[in-house]
Amino acid sequence: MTTRLTDLTAHRLLAGYARGDFSPVDAVRECLERAEAVQPAVNAFVRIDAEDALARAGESAARWLRGEPRGLLDGVPVTVKDLLLQRGVPTLRGSRTVDPKGPWTEDAPSVAALRRHGAVFLGRTTTPEFGWKGVTDSPLQGVTRNPHDPSRTSGGSSGGGAAAVALGAGPLSVGTDGGGSVRIPASFCGVFGLKPTYGRVPLYPASPFGTLAHVGPMARDAADTALMLDAMSAPDWRDWTQSPAEGELRGHLAEGVEGLRVAYSATLGGQVPVRPAVAAAVRRTAAALAGLGAYVEEADPDIADPVDAFHTLWFTGAARVVQHLGPRQRALLDPGLAEICAEGAGRSALDYLAAVDARAALGRRMGRFHTRFDLLVTPTLPITAFEAGAEVPAGSGLHRWTGWTPFTYPFNLTQQPAATVPCGTDGDGLPVGAQLVAARHRDALVLRAAHALHGAGAAVAPAPGGPR
C-alpha cells in the first residue's frame, strides 16, 4: 500500500524532506486536499489558507534543497485554533460579536514561534464562542463533528484541531486548554493532546480566564508533541507569567518508565461513575506501564470535587470576556455563554478570593501526592463522544459541560502537565483516552510515559471510521 503523506507524523515528514523523498509542497498540497475533502462532513475549519500555505511550502522546499532548513518544523503543516492571534488573518473566536476587519497585525507567541521554526499554517480551526465549553459549536461556525462518527461531537473547545489531526489535515495543531479543552477533544477524536505546565508556552493576549488557560499541542504521538512543544516554549516578553522552560523535552523521550511510581485512579476515589468500556481501556494502560517496569498501584489523590471553585473562576472570566459588549451584541451570544456570564457577573470579589484559596489548597494536596507518586493515571473522560450539537449527553441530567469532565478541570486549577493518550475504543468504535498527570514542571515525565506506551503499542491512535 502506498503511504499517504497525510498519514505521516511530523517526524516522518521531516525525515522525508531531508532524504528528498518528497517536498513540503507535496505534503502541504495533500493536507490541503484532505482538509477541503473532510470539511463538509466534519466542519473542523473556520478558514483554509491554501494560497498562502502553498507559497510558504515553496519557500520551505527551496530551503531544504539548499540544505538550510529553518528551525525544528520547516515545512510541517500545522493548524491553529481560532482563539490565537495569527498575523494577516482574522481571529473570530467563534463569535458574531468580533469585527473581522481587524486589524490583524500580530501573532500570538505560540504562533510566532511556530512561524520562526518554519511551520506552514494550513488554516484556522473551530472553537465554541470564546472557548467557553467542552464541545465545539458556535453561533458563527456551527457544529464541529467527530471524525469517527459525524453524528457525535468532536469535544472542545479545541475540537476543530483535534478532528483535523485525526483526519490527516495536518499532523500538528495548536489549541488552548482552560478546563480540558485540548485533552477533551483529543480523547474524543483519538489523538494525543497535552496541557503543559502553566506558563511553559507563553500566551498573549492574556486569557480572561486567567491562569486556568494553557496553550498546548495536539498530534498523533508524544514524539511530535515534544518537538512542537520545544518549538513553542521560547520566551516572549508579552507574557509576564511565563515560566522558563527547563530544557528541551525531545532528549528525554527514550528514558522510559522503569522504576517510576505510578498511581492508577479509576474513579477519583469513587467520585466519578465511569463507563465500563472506558474503565477497561484505561486499566489496560496502567497494566502496560507496569509491564514496562513502572511500579503501579491503585491510589486516589485527595481531590474533593473542586467544581464550585472552578465555576467561580470560569464564570467570572466569561463575564469579563463580554463586559464591553452592548445589549445588541450580547443578544448575538451563544445562550449558554450568556447564561454563565450572567452567573459570573453576580459573584463577588470575596467569592473569587474563596475560589483562589480552594485552588491553592488543591495545589498543595496534589503537590503532596506527587511526593509519593511520579505519575497519576486516570481516564481522560468517563464517557466517549456523545451527540453533536449538545453541551451535555442527552438524558444525563447534567446542566453544564463540567458535569462530564471531572478528570480534566482539576489539573487546570493546579497547573500540572496532563496528557491524554489514545488507549482503545468502546463498543461503538469511539476512542477512549487515558490521562497521564505529573507534578508541575515535569512535562518531560508525562511525555516519556506516553512515548513508552506508544512504543509498546498501547497508545496508538485508532483510524477514523468517518470521512476520509
Image (cartoon, helix red, strand yellow):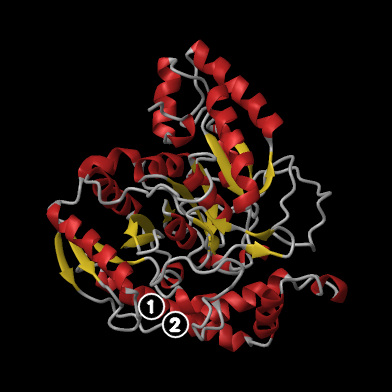
When the figure is inspected, residue 188 is found, relative to residue 353, above or below; the finding is above
Residue 449 point in image, percent of width and height: 26, 52
Q: Is residue 44 left or right of residue 289?
A: right
Residue 372 point in image, percent of width and height: 19, 69
| Numbered disc 2: secondary structure | helix
Q: Residues within 10 Å of mark 2 (few under 14, many from 20)?
A: some
Q: Is residue 274 left or right of residue 151?
A: left
Q: Is residue 334 left or right of residue 332?
A: left
Q: Residues within 10 Å of mark 1 (few under 14, many from 20)?
A: many
Tag 2 residue: 358
Q: Residue at x 79, y 59 (%)?
A: 98
Quarter of the rendering containing residue 288:
bottom left
Query: Which amino acid is tagged 1?
Result: Leu
Q: Which mark is residue 205?
A: none
Quarter of the rendering containing residue 318:
bottom right
| Numbered disc 1: secondary structure | helix
The answer to whether the residues at label 1 and label 2 have Cβ atoms under 8 Å apart is: yes
Q: Residue at x 52, y 39 (%)?
A: 170
Q: Is residue 237 visible?
A: no
Q: Is residue 452 visible?
A: yes
Tag 1 residue: 362
Q: Nearer the viewer, residue 355 or 241?
A: 355
When the figure is inspected, residue 319 is found, relative to residue 55, above or below; the finding is below
